[in-house]
Amino acid sequence: MVNVKLKPIALAVAGVLAATSAYAADAIKADKVDVVSTTPMPGIGLSINKVPANIQLVNGDEFKKQQSVTIADYMNNNLQGVSVVDTQNNPFQPDVTFRGFTASPLLGTPQGMSVYVDGVRVNESFGDAVNWDLIPMNAIANMSLIPGTNPLFGLNTLGGAISVQTKSGRTHQGGAAELSAGSWGRKTGSAEIGGVSKDGSVDYFFSANAFSEDGWRQASPTDVRQFFGKVGWQNETTKIDLSYTNANNDMIGNGLVQRELMQTLGRSTIHTKPDQTRNTLSFLNLSASHWFNDDVMFSGNAYYRNSKRKTLNGDVNDGYTGDDTNLAAYQSDCLANTGGDADEWCSGAINRSSTKQQSYGLNGQLTFNQALAGKSNQFVIGASYDISKIKFNQSEQLGSINASRGIDPLYDAEITTNLHGKTKTWSLFGTNTLSLNDYWHVTGSARYNHVKVDNVDQINAPGQSYTLLPSDPNYLASDETLTGNHTFSRINPALGLNFTPTKDLTVYGSYNEGNRAPTSMELGCANQYAPCKLPNAMAGDPPLKQVVARTFEGGLRGNLTEDIRWSAAVYRTENSNDIQFITTPSTINNMGYFDNVGKTRRVGIDTSLAGKLGQFGWNVGYSYVDATYQNDLSLANEVNSTAYTDGGGNDVINVRKGDRLANIPAHQLKVRLTYAVTPDWTVGSNITAFSDRYMRGNENNSHVANTPGFYEGNGKVAGYAIVNLDTRYNIGNGWSVFGKAINVFDTEYNNGGLMGETMFTSNGSFDANGNPSGFFSPGAPRAGWVGVRYEFLAPKAQ
């Protein structure tokens, strides 16, 4: 056996865990050496003073203290540069934006962030979507938000990466059970237990969560069920963990709502219903690490991930051409047209989709913590191989809109899309950090990504052309085939420099490159002549180019005193061949296609000041981002006051270089305050403020309000500020009670918007003529919850 002491293992693990509380307002120590993992896989780790990035670190206990529903909820309230858009208006389905890049559960949202759990990338293979409801909160030991285009975190890391490490029985011993209830009929329950065998070789951790609520908006119930388990074994040199995650969730979030409906019927009203998503997950992950000697460590994993997603959406039928305005008349019209004209005479449609995704792969790396030419040096080299298989189908069932804006189905469902896809990705990566002396540290990294995407249309065989219109006599139905083979590859480099003149100051600068290959979803919806209704139907498409991002970042961080930390970062990321979803005119339900729109740029700053003074703790963060188009382009649009008819007869707007991207606030301020009233009683508050943002449909930033024939609003989502409160009291003997209130001043606000066309009047009546309107994602009103927690079998303090 290799003679390796436990000391280096213990130091590495303890350092990584200690780093997770680096910026917690209530636990800051300047003399601690924070260690972070520089790759998705846990390794020996690197002192944060040598990392050329503004990494934000969160201890899992912070989620419990603030009673966060998801990691997205926590990030929106606490972390620099993060904002959300509640497009679905479900607490488990927000769109998260960081530095102008998005991680979203919605198909049709171009993704710009990667998310890892225990070294496994959990962006779904179909569309790179991120399902926040599939990450159990009480299983999280710590989380890192890594900024910028870090190539070590692989594909889709254009604006940043989220890395989650789960609990084990070795790090989280003891048990806990928790119940809470309150507003909107919300009821939650959770339990966890962890421990180590008597001989210290085996550890275990198990947790379960149950969440149920009626929702604050009409017809919006949610039920979430999650389970996580991990069993581990280790000796002096080797550690092996096998974890399993299971989820079975049923979520309804009825999305954006028309401005006039909110004004007349209240903010809890909905546009159409239902908008249901059912997610299930089975996720196995086998991870292992082995120390060959005191300086060389291997870590790797093998995983299998099986997720299923079913959606049911009640929508206005885009093909409707009738002019009746009462329920009985257009229902009669729909039933009378049993031939091929039914699509034109039925006002509503139920769209169903089913996505089955299987992913499996291997990841491994070697870390060498050995001197180079007598200087401190760490070298990591690794590889990964991932395969994803998808089966996607979608059907449409025509019907009639009823008085409650639901859909009464009147015909049988017809399958409109049936796609099988397979994606193979393999990567090689390496990174080296050399300390030239005690003050200067140089890091060089690179990753090669190779992606092959194969789509096979189960309905239409390959055709002859991608450019013929359906009205063209040479047009064939097979021109809309989804079948295609696409390959993308690229080497992405990175270079960083850190200067640490004292233990209380770090200055750094870096340059990084990364790429995002188009997904099966985007490659299956890139034809402007055959637009898609997302997240549903797709049509045959020309190939898209991969997105390449280049990021410059510089910053400083340090300690003013033993208990006060600060940081400041400035960055500039430019995307080439950026992909966006282009909405087509004359559509009610967001039909469109994906296209490369040229260059976009995000320039911004992130600052923070965190500390503790006696019983009082604080964490203040301010961020600014200027997210803009960097070339001129034309976008289809009928509701913007600057829209005009181009030479091809299309209604468009002109976007100019420098116009801001939609739904991204330029300014944000976040304040977290805590106060220990007694050793057993703490209170806390989160204050968040966001500036206004442009709505989708106003990408040229030029829409003028109250222009006849166009949307009456100003084309912006107003800025807002909200206050949340939380408290916890330890009764004793393991018992504690807690409470939380959100939006305590009951501020009415929206956090996202879209300019489009509606077929409803202000009182909810159907209007076949259609009118320009604004659609908003309304923020939740004031609400509160209380709960009780019991902790047991905790190890005694040494």
Image (spheres, rainbow, N blue to C red):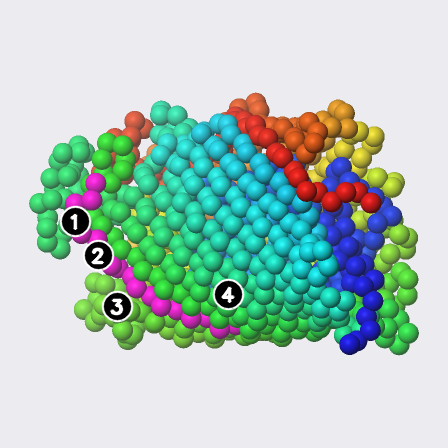
Disc nearest the viewer among 2 and 4? 4
Amino acid at circle 4: Tyr
Q: Which residue is mark 3?
A: 459
Residue 456's spot in the image, x, y percent?
34, 71
Is residue 542 within the magenta segment? Answer: no
Q: Quadrant of residue 147?
A: bottom right
Check disc 3 and report its element: helix, strand or loop. loop
Residue range in magenta is: 408-425
Amino acid beneath label 1:
Tyr
C-alpha separation, residue under disc 1 versus residue under disc 4: 39 Å
Say which amino acid is labelled 2.
Answer: Glu
Q: What residue sits 47% from the left and 58% below the top? A: 282
Residue 411: image tag: 1
The answer to whether any part of residue 78 appears in the image is no
Sequence-first disc among 2 and 4: 4
Which secondary structure dominates the residues rendered in magenta?
strand
Q: Where does label 2 land, which residue? A: 414
Q: Which residue is mark 4?
A: 304
Find the distance from the CA under tag 2 to the CA under tag 3. Answer: 12 Å
Query: How far separated are the C-alphas under marks 4 and 3?
Result: 29 Å
Mark 2 falls on what kind of element? strand
Crowd rating for badge 2 (residues with CA inside 10 Å; few <14, some 14–19, many 20+): few
Residue 727 is situated, as x and y percent measured from the top left of the image, at 65, 28
Image position, residue 679 (x, y; %): 77, 28
The residue located at (17%, 34%) in the rendering is 327
Percent x, y of residue 386: 52, 70
The number of callouts visible is 4
Q: Residue furthest left?
A: 336
Label 2 close to label 1 by CB (< 8 Å) = yes
Whether residue 467 sits left or right of residue 377 in the image: it is: left
Question: Are the residues tagged 2 and 4 within 8 Å (C-beta)?
Answer: no
First-in-chain label (4 vs 3): 4
